[in-house]
Amino acid sequence: MGNIIIGVIIAFIISFYAMPIIIKLADQIKLYDHPDERKVHRKPIPSLGGLGIFIGFMMGLLLTVHISAVDKQLQYYYASFLVVFFYGVKDDILKLRPMKKLLGQLIVSIILIFKANLVLTNMYGFMGVTYILESFSYLLTLTTIIVIMNAFNLIDGIDGLAGSLGILTASVFGTFFYLNGDLFYALMGFVLAASLFAFLIYNYSPAKIFMGDTGSMLVGLINAILVIHFVETAAASVYIPKQTSPAMGFGILLVPLLDTLRVFGIRILHGRSPFSPDRNHLHHLLLDRGFNHKQILFTLVSVAILFIVATYFALPLGCTKVILLQIALFFCGVFILTKTKKRPHQQLSVVRKEDFGKKDDAIGVIKNAK
């Protein structure tokens, strides 16, 4: 426990003091996330918060982990973190195309599957499936990693949301692993939560900095590692009923996961790439109904907590019933939300000076009510 506390303190302090330096650096080199018609912020905001999260997380982990506890897995975990860091920073600065980001996610998945041996091998009775074929287990694991990484990346749409959900999920996984005596994975979860908490101080509305793809991809990757390890080991725990670990793991990550899968499905049904931008995420739906950032944050985090608690108490029903019930409740909630009346909101239209006349020498911003 002592190492976990030290790791948490190190991660928090480093991330907390790194953020102002990163904000100042971004201001000096004019490195911002600029607003557009899809985004909800109205002024340029630095988007390299993931750099501070990464530094705090890595230092907290490196300075407190016992190498022998995780054998050779640790080096491959670090390798995957570095891959995410480098292509995440490049995307935050240069804006990579979706297929290039997907390629980076595939590289990370291959490292974890074939080098770290992080593989889902058992569905524990979900839809009657137990042990699965090796080839299918690789495909399932790869899909899981990529979907979770994109889930946290895509839900990072309003101040504090991705960071708050990341703290929640990492802390829940960390608590389980600590109770189960799996201290390295407990350390990973709590150190991530500490780094995110330090970041959230600067990201809480109104945000001074965003985590960017560097941060959101890292949060998604670590949660993917934690949930896969959870599913593979929780069946032997006294804290989770046997054969229900997939349902519990799914419940912990339900809000970002199902929101992403829902939006991917909508885009595909409309003949568009699943990575094409739109305004169909849950936070967009709530914004369109008059919620502000703080109200959306409170609502979605509360829903996530409710699903985690409800899932835990519903586990005696069995893996298949619980997962189907989770999905049904989520989509019922989304259906009710979409049927509520939208409220008029302000939309920014950026107009160039050429549109005004020769005497105008500034960019005009017109607010039009939808």
Image (tube, rainbow, N blue to C red):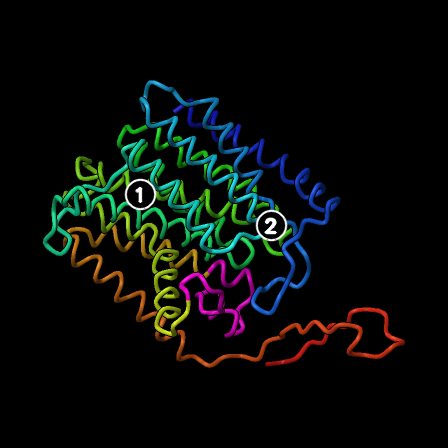
Is 366 left, or right, of 295 in this rendering? Answer: right
Closest to the observer: 203 or 112?
112
Residue 107 in percent (x, y) is at: 39, 41
Q: Secondary structure at mark 2?
A: helix
Mark closer to the chain start, 1 or 2? 2
Q: Secondary structure at mark 1?
A: helix
Residue 78 in percent (x, y) is at: 43, 30
Quadrant that contains the N terminus:
top left
Q: Does the magenta portion include 302? A: no
Q: Amino acid at mark 2?
A: Leu
- At 16% from the left edge and 43% from the top edge, which residue is drawn? 122
Is 86 left, or right, of 36 in this rendering? Answer: left
Residue sitting at the far left: 128
- At 26% from the left edge and 53% from the top edge, which residue is drawn? 311
Quadrant that contains the C terminus:
bottom right
Highlighted magenta segment, given as a residue range: 273-298
Q: Quickly name the residue at label 2.
A: 94
Q: Quickly name the residue at label 1.
A: 227
